[in-house]
Image: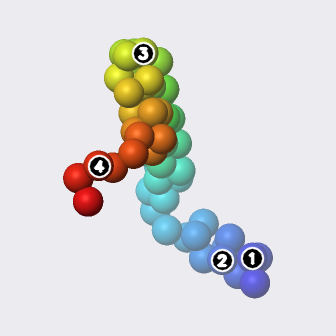
Amino acid sequence: MLKFINQHMATIAGIEIFPIISLLIFFTFFVGLGLWVFSYKKDTIRVLSEMPLEEDTTA
């Protein structure tokens, strides 16, 4: 089955660009996500991590 798919994909003109575009999109996304995570303020992370431990007194 994979041989059939491989032969079929080889006949499509210009298909070799799609894996490159996909790799660039995912690489850019994960690098951006990493930069966002490492630039996040430590105080905000501390507050967000303590939220589940706080008691809800409004209910």
The quadrant of the rendering that contains the C terminus is bottom left
User: In this figure, which residue is indicated by the disc labeled 3?
Assistant: 42
Earlier in the chain: of badge 3 and badge 1, it is: 1
User: In this figure, which residue is indicated by the disc labeled 2?
Assistant: 5
Earlier in the chain: of badge 2 and badge 4, it is: 2
- Circle 4: element type: loop
Image side of residue 29 versus residue 5, left or right:
left
Label 3 crowding class (10 Å Cα cut-off): few <14, some 14-19, many 20+?
few
Residue 14 visible to an observer of this rendering: yes
Where is residue 16? Give x, y as percent. 53, 52
- Circle 3: element type: helix
Instruction: Please name the residue shown 75% across and 76% down the image.
Output: 2
| In this view, the mark in front (2 or 4) | 4
| In this view, the mark in front (3 or 2) | 3
Q: Is residue 8 above or below residue 54?
A: below
- Circle 1: element type: helix
Instruction: Please name the residue shown 48% across and 59% down the image.
Output: 15
Label 2 crowding class (10 Å Cα cut-off): few <14, some 14-19, many 20+?
few
User: In this figure, which residue is indicated by the disc labeled 4?
Assistant: 57
- Residue type at mark 4 is Thr
